[in-house]
Image: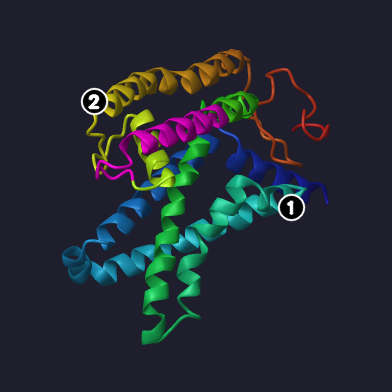
Amino acid sequence: MTNHKNWKSKLHDIIYEADTPIGKLFDVILLILILFSIALVMLESIESINNKYHDFFNYAEWVITILFTIEYFARIISIKNKKSYILSFYGVIDFLSTIPKYLSFFLVGAHAMVALRALRLLRVFRVLKLARFVGESENLMKALKASRAKISVFLLAVIMISVILGSLMYLIEINQDSGFDSIPRAVYWAIVTLTTVGYGDIAPVTPFGQFIASIIMIMGYAIIAIPTGIVSVEYSKHKDIDTNTQSCPHCTATDHHDDAEFCYECGKKLN
């Protein structure tokens, strides 16, 4: 029983942590596989290349799928609270990036070819697996969560401004055949202009309408800077925290302090 626990503990250290040489090697190999699989998906979408190397793409995809399947089950085996990983963000992404190739066994025949093409796109989810290799990604996620209330209020204010300005532009441009033929369409124009996108499909033609548009454009630059400042403040609060890559073998929580003995999430003892 002790050997079994030691084996699972070593497997956990290799897969979930990067402070050891073998853990770093595992992450590097997995990173290369992810990048290679993404490159395959992109090249496969080019018809001339796919026609020439279709068999190679198929075999390579099977090899990568099997390796990712082994990794997925190894992650489940190496933790005690398996449900915490399976239902986590990374767990769902790992599952979605693995199943498309297996589903091709069940969807066969000409009528299923369209569905198969859509399923192959699920492999693009592998790009999200890269997030676990970005050391600052956890701090960024914490900053976004901490600032979600302020950002929500900010977005609500932007929506209100867009509705008001869109309605105003509708009243100004309603009889000018300039594209402001309804309030929703005018609100769409206000959002596009406020975010400095400017498609140009709708444009005011009256002097007063152009004056209002100019004000909205200037406001857009100020509005874009606000959420950046909110997140930056929260991010600066988290980036200086002294953490390591140790992952809890029970709930897979990360970012523990260097001297931590117990998990801050579930309270269980760390390895």
Q: Does the stretch in magenta take in 176?
A: yes
Residue drawn where x is 44% and y is 67% of the image: 119
**Residue span colored magenta:** 155-180
Residue drawn where x is 31% and y is 26% of the image: 213
Residue drawn where x is 55% and y is 37% of the image: 23
- Per the image, the residue denoted by label 1 is 83
Residue 98 in percent (x, y) is at: 51, 61
Q: Is residue 228 above or below residue 99?
A: above
Nearer to us in this view, 5 or 147: 147
Q: Nearer the viewer, mark 1 or mark 2?
A: 2
Residue drawn where x is 69% and y is 35% of the image: 253
User: To which quarter of the image does residue 190 belong?
Assistant: top left
Q: Does the stretch in magenta take in 116?
A: no
- Crowd around label 1: few <14 · some 14–19 · many ≥20 (10 Å): few
State the SS at label 1: helix
- Per the image, the residue denoted by label 2 is 207
Q: Is residue 29 above or below residue 256?
A: below
For badge 2, the amino acid type reads Pro
- Crowd around label 2: few <14 · some 14–19 · many ≥20 (10 Å): few
Q: Is there CB contact under 8 Å for labels 1 and 2? A: no
Horizontally, is 133 left or right of 49 in the view? right
Horizontally, is 218 left or right of 23 in the view? left
Residue 123 in percent (x, y) is at: 43, 58
Residue 93 in percent (x, y) is at: 54, 52
CA distance separating discs 1 and 2? 62 Å
State which quarter of the image contains the C terminus: top right
Q: Is residue 199 above or below residue 108?
A: above
